[in-house]
Image (cartoon, grey):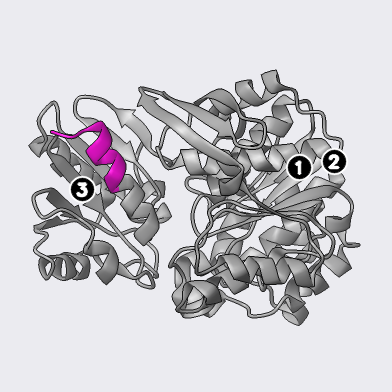
Amino acid sequence: MTYQETLAYLYEQLPMFSRIGAAAYKKDLHNTIELCKSLGNPQHQFKTVHVAGTNGKGSTCHMLAAIFQQAGYKTGLYTSPHIKAFGERIRINGQMINESFVIDFVEKTKSLYETIQPSFFELTVAMAFEYFAKEKVDIAIIETGLGGRLDSTNIISPILSVITNIGYDHMNLLGNTLPEIAGQKAGIIKQNTPVVIGEILPETKNVFVQEANDKEAPLYFAQGRYVAEYIEPTGNLMFCNVKDLLTNTTEKLRLDLNGIYQAKNICTVLCVVDQLRKKGYDIPEAALHTALENVKTLTGLRGRWEIVQNHPAIILDVAHNTDGIKQVLFQLKNNYPTAQIHFVLGFVKDKDVEHVLDLFPKEAFYYFTNAHIPRALPHEELKNMAAQKELTGESFDDVNKAIEAAKTKAATNDVIMICGSFFIIGEVNN
């Protein structure tokens, strides 16, 4: 098969959560364990850092990968979902997985499909582990797909676990309360393995303390160690001063990920770096600073407060749940206090769209759309739901047509904000 035929096979023949939702979710690790066993357990052949969380885990993974890469380590990075290309999921030093490896891996494992019947995610996790082992990475940053305890990535034995934060998302699979969701994320905590928690919530703190105690895992709360004192997004960089409460020193950082919400993630990243230095990793200050200024260049991260045009400003962000949308709305008010906002919105069916829509301002202009996947919420249905919240606008079956309509209507100083789904961002022509 060609590379495109191989990808078509993966997308069409294997259950894919990003396309069909919960029907593709496997509630145990059996398939991944069996797949990896048949490959000689490649996940045990390299060091890993495991990252879970409701929001910010992708950005955190990319920042950590950039730092290790800049410090001279051969660095693997596994994230999901991809935005434009399948290869975004599996990278080494920022370079997407070799296409011939994907073809060969799928051919090699086809004989296992009938007996194991893996999902798309289970197979790609095994593919990433095999690739990182074959290429002999020094370390790999592994992002969970959904949850943690039952996530396919949770067969690794990391040197450190990270949980960025807990919020409401995937409640149909992870639970309806914050402690329930935290309990699933806490499942990545391993015996005697340090864990860094990014954001502390009163409702979830004890969940992590209990799990860490049960596993005799050293527990570190980034929010109790680091505080972002000064944040200023300016153009393509964000200036961020972070105070270390333990040493009473301040780190002056410049980030090319310029969403204000990255201030929370950078505190988590600094706490992780501190722990990894104690484990013997040589991460010079100069490498850390250079990496944080060049995350997008080093690792290819996209879709996080990504400004693709000015006058009018056009911004892409993959925010898709209550906490993520709140952060986007906060930054719009902070960066563009007097601008007229045009929202191009699209969601998937299994999100809590009703509550998310409650957050949006009634005075904005709206352009409702949908991605072209079975899981997408149809644009006309979204338009009707929004009308119940007094959010009015037109609807479009293609995000690019929605953007064109917004550009036609927008004045020079207006802002066009495109958000609501990874898959909407993935279909933007840019």
The amino acid type of the residue labelled 2 equals Lys
Compared across the picture, whether 207 is left or right of 418 comes to right
Callout 2–callout 3 Cβ contact below 8 Å: no
Query: Please, what is the three-letter code of the amino acid marked with disc 1?
Result: Gln
The residue lying furthest to the top in this view is 286
Magenta residues, start to end = 329-338
Magenta stretch encompasses residue 97: no
Quadrant of the drawing holding the C terminus = top left
Residue 386 drawn above or below residue 423: below
Left or right for 194, reference 296:
right
Q: Secondary structure at mark 2?
A: loop
Is residue 334 inside the magenta stretch? yes
Viewer-closest of 335 and 89: 335
Disc 3: CA contacts within 10 A as few (<14), some (14-19) or many (>=20): many
Viewer-closest of 165 and 74: 165
Amino acid tagged 3? Phe
* Residue under label 2: 279
**C-alpha gap between disc 3 and disc 1:** 41 Å
Residue at coordinates 38% horizontally, 47% vertically from top-left? 425
- The x, y position of residue 284, in whole percent, is 75, 23
Q: Quadrant of residue 289?
A: top right
Tell me the residue that label 3 is attached to: 343
Query: Which residue does the image show at 57% across and 69% down from the upper left?
Result: 182
Distance between mark 2 and mark 3 Cα atoms: 46 Å
Image coords of residue 420 (percent x, y): 33, 55
Q: Quadrant of the N terminus?
A: bottom right
For the residues labelled 1 and 2, say whether their Cβ atoms are less than 8 Å apart.
Answer: yes
Q: Quadrant of residue 397?
A: bottom left
Residue matched to label 1: 275
